[in-house]
Amino acid sequence: MNIYDIAREANVSIATVSRVLNGNGSVRDITRQRVEQVLNKYHYVPSAIARGMVTNSMKTIGVVSIDIRNLYYANVSYSIEQALRVLGFSTILCNTGYDTEQKLSYLKMLTEKKVDSIILIGSIFKDPKLNKPIKEISKSIPIIIINGYYGYPNTYSIQYEDAEALEKSVDYLVSRGRKKFLYLYDADTFSGNQKLLGFKNSVKKHDLKFDIRFIPPGIDHAYREMCELINQGSFFDAVLTSEDITAIGALQCLLEKNIRVPEEVSVMGYNNSILSLCCTPRLSTVDSLSEEMGKTAVSVLCRILSGEKVEASVKIGAKIVLRQSA
Amino acid sequence: MNIYDIAREANVSIATVSRVLNGNGSVRDITRQRVEQVLNKYHYVPSAIARGMVTNSMKTIGVVSIDIRNLYYANVSYSIEQALRVLGFSTILCNTGYDTEQKLSYLKMLTEKKVDSIILIGSIFKDPKLNKPIKEISKSIPIIIINGYYGYPNTYSIQYEDAEALEKSVDYLVSRGRKKFLYLYDADTFSGNQKLLGFKNSVKKHDLKFDIRFIPPGIDHAYREMCELINQGSFFDAVLTSEDITAIGALQCLLEKNIRVPEEVSVMGYNNSILSLCCTPRLSTVDSLSEEMGKTAVSVLCRILSGEKVEASVKIGAKIVLRQSA
DNA sequence: CTGTTAGCGCATTCAG
DNA sequence: CTGAATGCGCTAACAG
């Protein structure tokens, strides 16, 4: 069932059918009704592909992250998808993992499918092998990166103020009398570096004692690292992390060793994910405003697509939420 | 840059270009090389839209769930996307929420985009207003529903053995000497009903005392319900739930009231999500095998698309994982 | 207000 | 092994 069939049955031309379908151009009321009747009779559904062929757009955006199972990515993807939907766009979901070849392959697929834009979530896309392809793609469609930065033309960046968030956290803990800080982080990314930078700056500013540990992602690595540290006799009264899950691993070790949180040691997570509500005591954490990040990305995109000049980089945030662990 | 440009520059016809692009038909080696050279020179990318126009497929599948922020949906979506990718399909992500109109609107969008199939995650799609549209759509493409059932032709169902999982849980707890059971659930869905059924059957089989409570989703509702129950003097030594997060809410209440888990009360969650690792004590839970569910859906789909006759319904699972809470 | 016509970029016959 | 011709379903001039 196509536009010709409808036209024939309604005794009009395909142009008229197209007009009533898209609500543009003027059609006499009687004619419109006649066409609509046929449309309904056959449950006619226009082909977005054929339309895309003409308009050169499928009204589709590629949203790519490492792994949607990560709560932060899930939250951001969700808010992007919802905002996009309102604008009439659908979203192609891409979980690239860490492999560069996979990332390239997803980029290629999105290019073939002629998406109207690509939104990258997470600075994992700082892989240098991706630079040229990204630059190339950005010549034909805008690329938006959340928590990352490229600096090419037609490339836009939405960044959370990670450094500031860490500074706020340290400031708060200092105000509560904490003196010796531990920072646990698990990712050498754009965001990861910002966080680290914020921690370092802040700790220097207050002239604090501190230790920094890089550990693989996951609750158990954090748990083990913490136990080892304590067994070695390290002393600290505040532990900050780059992820909620890391904080929870540390917390569980502390609890097991009967070290009271927050009385003896303060613990702060990062992301304000639902995980931070599941541990006991509940986690104080940085609210990474995932919803706002996603919405902002889409609103930036929307302005780009409607031809506005848009600032290449927008910053968001830095908010901490205090619960029981600090 | 299209196939004509390439053809002209390589001094061949578009048919030949098409042949080397798709690797079918035979092309003389020299000719192929000449074409490939031009292809590379211009970083030519074929248009999936134009291809879709001819083949009537964009090699795209719609994956729809209520809300990808829910860990279970995220996990299933992830494994679907990954499995699909290997087969050369991309996935359009749809978060419908609970509103029927939204669901219809997503269904319409997917139909317009001519997806090759739709995979529904979760039985929320039992909304009767969806029946006719689903039935209609299934006339042109296969529909796969995870944890639900339609029974229309060209409609397939992948179901987790929720009833059995609950039975296993109760059996286990009985074997540990538990006598009075509480079941907390939050969703009146296909899966939800299966779980409830399993609980009821099992509790009758063992001739146990039990209570069942329906509460809104979320950790705090579970927490409050539990506190209320205890304040009212209800007694139970085993609490089962339909979601990990519910179990954790209950657990937090128990802990706060200095009721020891699992010594005095056993608690079991559902899903084996990462949440179950974040609480203390860590949660014993039902492993809902999200990865297997997703993979199975795709493998079923793959067989359907290649023309095989496929069973309309496949069942998976029932596995519990024991940790500290029970 | 309505119809005619010309592509959009590709896969796919059918000839040669 | 290669090329010419056709059509997929629709939008967008353009003409009437």
Image: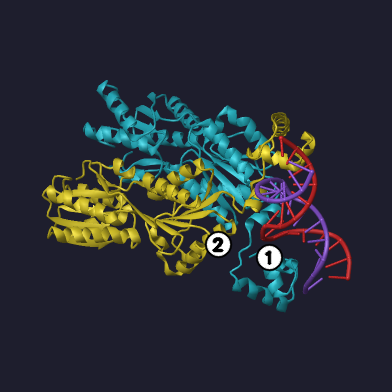
Chain colours: A yellow, B cyan, C red, D purple
Residues A25 and B322: in front is A25
Image quarter of residue B9: bottom right
Residues B27 and B43: in front is B43
Specify the amino acid type for callout 2: Lys
Q: Which residue is mark 2?
A: A108
Instruction: Tell which subunit mark 1 falls on.
Output: B
Q: Residue at x 27, y 27 (%)?
A: B227
Which part of the image, by quadrant, shows the N terminus of chain B? bottom right
Q: Is residue A55 left or right of residue B288?
A: right
Q: Position of residue D1 (x, y in %)?
A: 77, 74
Q: Is residue B167 left or right of residue C12?
A: left
Give the mark toward the camera: 1 or 2.
1
Which part of the image, by quadrant, shows the C terminus of chain B? top left
Q: Residue at x 61, y 31 (%)?
A: B131
User: Looking at the image, can residue B266 be seen?
Assistant: no
Q: Is residue A77 left or right of residue A195?
A: right
Q: Which residue is mark 1?
A: B3
Specify the amino acid type for callout 1: Ile
Up/down of A60 relative to A192, above or below: above
User: Looking at the image, can residue B30 be seen?
Assistant: yes
Q: Position of residue A20 (x, y in %)?
A: 67, 37
Element on which disc 2 rests? helix
Q: CA distance from mark 1 to mark 2?
A: 17 Å
Task: Return the residue found at the far top.
Answer: B232
Q: Position of residue B214 (x, y in %)?
A: 40, 26
Q: Residue at x 63, y 42 (%)?
A: B111
